[in-house]
Image: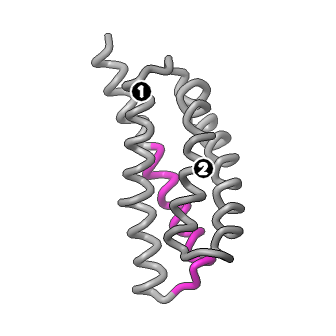
Amino acid sequence: MQQFIRFCIVGGIATALDACLYLLFINWMSYQASMVLSYTICLCLNMLATLRWTFRTRITFRGAAAVVFAHMFNLFVVRYKLMVLFVVTLHMNERAAYFPTLGISVLVNYYIIKGILNKTEQSSK
């Protein structure tokens, strides 16, 4: 439970920054480009905190690569497809569609990262 709380704190800070950047960038570019750019910036800031503080793992190349993979899967498979579903299929506003997409992707991302890091830690023992 403490791990999930730490994940929520780190994720909350990164998410707030991601949302602010997305809402800023959408004024100058498509929602797709805004989403990718804001998420990528926050990924860079979030990665070290996720590995060191949330999951309290040593930072290894394998662990870092696993976190990047999880985030890229989340961005391009989960978030991107949800945004297309909400914006194109359900005709939601790009700004409004960001928030349900965000909620779903946060939960998916937690379980993906947790599973990958547990697997990489077990294989390194």
Which residue is drawn at the image coordinates 40% and 60% (left, top)?
A: 78
Quarter of the N terminus within the rendering: top right
Q: Which mark is residue 41?
A: 2
Quarter of the C terminus within the rendering: top left
Quarter of the image where one finds residue 75? bottom left
User: For the magenta stretch, what is the residue range?
Assistant: 92-110
Which residue is drawn at the image coordinates 32% and 27% (left, top)?
A: 119
For mark 2, give the secondary structure.
helix
Name the chief secondary structure element in magenta: helix
Name the residue tied to disc 1. 63
Which residue is drawn at the image coordinates 52% and 53% (left, top)?
A: 106
Farthest top residue in view: 125
User: In the picture shown, does residue 32 fall above or below 88?
Assistant: above
Residue 16 appears in the rendering: yes
From the top left corner, tell me how far across and down residue 24 is, in percent.
Answer: 71, 68
User: In the picture shown, does residue 7 fall above or below 42?
Assistant: above
Which tag is nearer the camera, tag 2 or tag 1?
Answer: 2
The kind of residue on which mark 2 rests is Ile
Q: How is the image coloured?
A: one colour
From the top left corner, tell me how far across and down residue 35 is, in percent.
Answer: 54, 64
From the top left corner, tell me how far across and down residue 46 is, in percent.
Answer: 60, 40
Left or right relative to 9: residue 57: left
Magenta residue check for 86? no
Left or right relative to 120: residue 5: right
- Along the line of sight, which residue is nearer the eye, 108 or 84? 84
For mark 1, give the secondary structure.
helix
Q: Residues within 10 Å of mark 2 (few under 14, many from 20)?
A: some
Farthest bottom residue in view: 91
Which residue is drawn at the image coordinates 53% and 28% (left, top)?
A: 51
Quarter of the image where one finds residue 85? bottom left
